[in-house]
């Protein structure tokens, strides 16, 4: 197809082409100028003369940097150049000569120069990287769809200065473990229920020997949903299923794998009468449920265990120099940091051989018992007694099972 020749383009078309060029070729660290734009083949024929160009940029800035209340804060502007900041920025200057021009706008029109021009991006490059990281790790997209989505993000939200990274990390070798369509539908329904503060009901399933999902109970579960959590490549729901024990309602937090749910519905919802569903149990009435979400939840609820966290004291094997127990042979806390981040507390080093370390952390008792067995060659549970006894009981059962 031959290149289109223009004798005179419409004003709105000039604006669009200039905006498109600025969006793709400028950022705060890489502003442009009228001279540079005249050399760019994709936009040069839309520049016009100097007066036309100046008027277009000023009008674009006024339109894109304001709303019904006036000019926005500088961080919310879309078109930026130095003199626009001077006259309309957060610390705008005033001039005694303004009265000679009849209005602030007329004065600015006569005095503003277009230099340091760039498109102020909605997302920083660090935020773009976070978006791409999220796309790579999501379970609701296959590799091909993830790559296509990342390409759209890079094409529409970045510039030529953005350093593109790998697009298939975490996706290429990942086995197909869940029905992505089902998972996406589940997430949407659950989020709608959370937004409307109502309950959901669903079949909760497990995999059988034919590799198919089948219900683990004879009737649907009904729960009050509160938080959707992404952890270890899976999605979980923090919820409350009310049960009655000895005539009394018991309301404890429970955690459900969303990929094992089917036929999710919102009971009592009737759109025709604007009824959103059965009201959920208030957060404050649910035992062990966080009132607001905190990022350290997973560190205290390892492997998404939902019993109440307690402070656990551990003895950590950390070899020291024979002639100096204060000196470690090597950095050997990586395994602990992988599971607990910086949430564990170093207490002390024992005063006698083998000079093990004592540390504490807050963690689910159930999860700690299994984790301590996994790292039994490196850790020993010291307290509380109930958690230590649970480890001992598991070891006894293993001895019986394997005839030791």
Image (tube, rainbow, N blue to C red):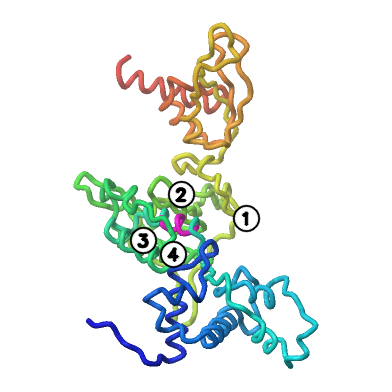
Depth check, mark 4 against mark 1: the one in front is 4
Q: Residue furthest right?
A: 96
Q: Tag 2's secondary structure?
A: strand
Q: Are marks 2 and 4 in contact (CB under 8 Å)?
A: no
Depicted 32 relative to depicted 164: above or below: below
Q: Give x and y (percent) for residue 179.
A: 28, 57
Q: Which residue is mark 3?
A: 150
Camera-near label (3 vs 1) is 3
Q: Label 2, label 3: how many angstroms apart (C-alpha)?
A: 31 Å
Q: Is residue 94 left or right of residue 401?
A: right
Residue 44 in the image: state x and y as whole percent: 41, 79
Which is more N-terminal, label 3 or label 4? 3
Q: Main secondary structure of the magenta part?
A: helix
Instruction: Specify whether 287 is left or right of 146.
Output: right
Quadrant holding the C terminus: top left
- Residue under label 2: 255
Task: Kindly report which numbered mark, 4 or 3, lies closer to the viewer in this rendering.
Answer: 4
Identify the residue at image location x=51%, y=18%.
318
Magenta residues, as a range?
127-132
Q: Earlier in the sequence, mark 1 or mark 2?
A: 2
**In this view, 74 is above or below 392:** below
Residue drawn at (42%, 25%) of the image: 394
Camera-nearest residue between 145 and 85:
85
Measured as percent of width and height from the top left, residue 224 is found at: 50, 59
**With respect to residue 46, does 179 lie above or below?**
above
Q: Residue beneath label 1, please?
A: 284
Residue 128 higher or lower than 196, as above or below: above
Q: Nearer the viewer, residue 205 or 67?
A: 67
Callout 2 crowding tier (Cα within 10 Å): few <14, some 14–19, many ≥20: some
| Res 158 label | 4
> In 3D space, how far apart are the residues under numbered discs 3 and 1 (Cα atoms)?
40 Å
């Amino acid at each position: 197809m031959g290149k289109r020749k223009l004798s005179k383009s419409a004003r709105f078309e000039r604006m669009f082409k200039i905006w498109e060029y600025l969006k793709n070729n400028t950022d705060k660290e890489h502003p442009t100028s009228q001279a540079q734009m005249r050399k760019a083949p994709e936009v040069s024929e839309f520049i016009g003369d100097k007066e036309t160009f100046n008027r277009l940029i000023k009008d674009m800035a006024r339109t894109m940097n304001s709303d019904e209340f006036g000019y926005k804060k500088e961080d919310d502007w879309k078109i930026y150049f130095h003199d626009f900041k001077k006259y309309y920025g957060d610390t705008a200057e005033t001039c005694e000569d303004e009265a000679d021009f009849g209005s602030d706008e007329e004065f600015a029109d006569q005095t503003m120069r277009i230099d340091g021009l760039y498109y102020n991006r909605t997302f920083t490059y660090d935020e773009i990287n976070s978006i791409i990281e999220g796309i790579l790790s999501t379970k609701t997209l296959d590799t091909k769809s993830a790559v296509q989505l990342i390409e759209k993000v890079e094409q529409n939200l970045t510039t030529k200065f953005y350093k593109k990274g790998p697009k298939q990390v975490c996706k290429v070798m990942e086995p197909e473990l869940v029905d992505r369509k089902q998972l996406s539908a589940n997430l949407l329904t659950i989020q709608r229920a959370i937004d409307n503060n109502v309950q959901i009901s669903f079949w909760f399933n497990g995999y059988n020997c034919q590799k198919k999902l089948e219900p683990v109970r004879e009737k649907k579960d009904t729960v009050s949903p509160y938080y959707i959590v992404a952890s270890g490549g899976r999605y979980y729901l923090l919820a409350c299923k009310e049960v009655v024990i000895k005539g009394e309602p018991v309301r404890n937090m429970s955690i459900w794998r969303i990929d094992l749910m089917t036929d999710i519905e919102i009971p009592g919802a009737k759109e025709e009468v604007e009824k959103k569903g059965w009201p959920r149990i208030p957060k404050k009435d649910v035992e062990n449920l966080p009132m607001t979400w905190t990022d350290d939840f997973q560190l205290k609820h390892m492997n998404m265990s939902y019993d109440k966290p307690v402070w656990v004291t551990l003895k950590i094997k950390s070899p020291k120099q024979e002639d100096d127990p204060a000196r470690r042979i090597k950095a050997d806390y990586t395994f602990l940091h992988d599971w607990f981040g910086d949430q564990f507390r170093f207490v002390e080093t024992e005063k006698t051989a083998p000079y093990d370390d004592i540390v504490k952390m807050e963690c689910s008792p159930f999860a700690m018992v299994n984790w301590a067995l996994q790292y039994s060659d490196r850790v020993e549970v010291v307290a509380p007694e109930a958690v230590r006894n649970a480890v001992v009981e598991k070891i006894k059962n293993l001895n019986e099972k394997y005839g030791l």
